[in-house]
Amino acid sequence: MQIEFEGKTLTLPVIKGSEGEVGIDISQLRAKTGAITLDPGFGNTGACQSAITFIDGERGILRYRGYPIDQLAAESTFLEVAWLLIKGELPTESQLEHFSDTVTHHTMVHQDFTRLFEAFPKDAHPMPVCAAAVGALATFYQEPETEQSIQEAVIRLIAKMPTIAAYSYKHSIGQPFMYPKNALEYSSNFLNMMFANPCEEYVVNPVLARAVDLLLILHADHEQNCSTSTVRVVGSSRANLFASIAAGISALWGPLHGGANQQVIEMLDRIEQEGGDVQKFVDRAKDKKDNSRLMGFGHRVYKNYDPRAAILRESCTQVLNTLGVSSRQLEIAMKLEKIALEDEYFISHKLYPNVDFYSGIIYRALGVPVNMFTVMFTLGRLPGWIAQWIEMRNDPDTRIARPRQIYTGATERSYAPIEQRSSS
Ligand code: ACO
């Protein structure tokens, strides 16, 4: 492709992805013309080439390593999906067995590490606690970076993340930490560490453990989103995997990223408290003078039904049936969805339910408190962050991330002695 700038013609290579996506390579732009591009929010900027996750938001497609999300949700487990994302192929039976076994045997944290949690206030939000704890893992595993130490860090992170997440919750409610149980599968082990206590037996319900596994699968990767880009940017400076993932957790904490499912639950609560008038909330979301939006609707990338929301809608009903509870929130959510999907405003704006619309209802039914919702997202997103970090490190084109800017501040001026300054 050719562009003309200030009388100069520049030929820019066009890069084509395996699904026909097209990008214009501008890496020589500044060197050849002196100009840079300006793209706040990076909506038009590809930061890398990646072979991990494919999304077609117009058609509602999400695939990990080529496998459609609905097939993985129906057939796979979270640990298998983690292997797939990180290694690139589905594991053989013996590879999966070995991987699960290794993860299971690294779930405990160093006893000194547990004291870290005591330093946080009782009402500490579990997300910054998790970010701090993952960063602190780097102080317990300080080996020089080699292929093998990276592989060990991968296992340690996947194995210890549920333990760290559950400990951050137990600390916040003043209960003793529950050690991991090697006899339990990944998601059952997490539920046990969250909800068991030393005084009585806790039996993990397999339907609920499967629902957690499903939620983790659905959140496992989503290409170059805010937290994943953060992990890549931090890792591009050669910061270690623990430090890079800790930064990703901090990015995910923001309400515009990982915090939306909490807002969905709060909105459903509000609708219920105000008498269940769903139409009123839909009308308010359409009114440009009113700042409210339908939380859990719309997505920067999906301009069609988010495929993950369709899967969760079904799981939601299954979880509630298993628990034998009727959820007023689910009723309201389904009513809301029906009205919105038939409404001209939502149709013309291509606003469909996203993954957060139903996940909060499931978490609440499982007994997961609202401030742990984003931590659940963290558990799921971890293998995606790891896969993207490794891909970035192995990519010969990786350079330290260092965007440029268009400076708009004062031009050069002379330093004024303090007595000559006036306040403006
Ligand atoms: N309710 C009502 N109107 C909406 C909504 C909504 N949920 N979302 C977008 N719109 C409207 C906007 O008012 C705007 O209308 P206009 O063109 O007439 O002015 C148009 O749709 C485009 O909206 P943008 O904000 O420009 O879309 P963007 O892609 O930047 O935002 C976002 C996407 C942030 C997800 C937005 O749809 C939103 O705020 N949704 C509610 C919050 C939410 O559910 N977030 C979770 C996202 S999923 C995740 O992060 C895992």
Image (spheres, helix red, strand yellow):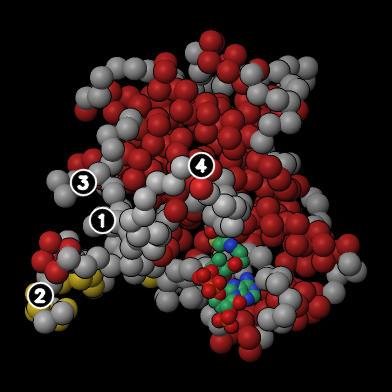
Tag 1: amino acid? Cys
> Marks 2/4: CA distance?
50 Å
Label 1 sits on residue: 48
In the rendered structure, which disc, 1 or 3, sits on the residue that comes first in sequence? 1
Mark toward the viewer: 2 or 1: 2
- Identify the residue shown where x is 68% and y is 70%: 294
- Identify the residue shown where x is 67% and y is 47%: 363
- Identify the residue shown where x is 70% and y is 76%: 285
Is the residue 102 above or below the residue 269 in the image?
Answer: above
Q: Are marks 2 and 1 in contact (CB under 8 Å)?
A: no
In the rendered structure, which disc, 4 or 3, sits on the residue that comes first in sequence? 3
Question: Residue 30 sits in which quadrant?
Answer: bottom left
Mark toward the viewer: 1 or 3: 3
Q: Are marks 1 and 3 in contact (CB under 8 Å)?
A: no
Tag 2: amino acid? Leu
Label 3 sits on residue: 399
Q: How would you rate the neighbour count of disc 2 (Cα within 10 Å): few for under 14, some for 14-19, many for 20 or more?
A: some
In the rendered structure, which disc, 1 or 4, sits on the residue that comes first in sequence? 1
Which secondary structure, mark 3? Answer: loop
> Marks 1/4: CA distance?
48 Å
Is residue 411 found left or right of 167 in the rendered image?
left
Which secondary structure, mark 4? Answer: helix
Whole-percent x, y for residue 372 in the image:
65, 41
In the rendered structure, which disc, 2 or 4, sits on the residue that comes first in sequence? 2
Rendered image: mark on residue 418: 4
Is the residue 106 above or below the residue 297 in the image?
Answer: above
Mark toward the viewer: 2 or 4: 4
Label 2 sits on residue: 10
In the rendered structure, which disc, 3 or 2, sits on the residue that comes first in sequence? 2
Tag 4: amino acid? Ile
Q: Visible in this render: residue 352?
A: no
Residue lying farthest to the bottom in this orientation:
344
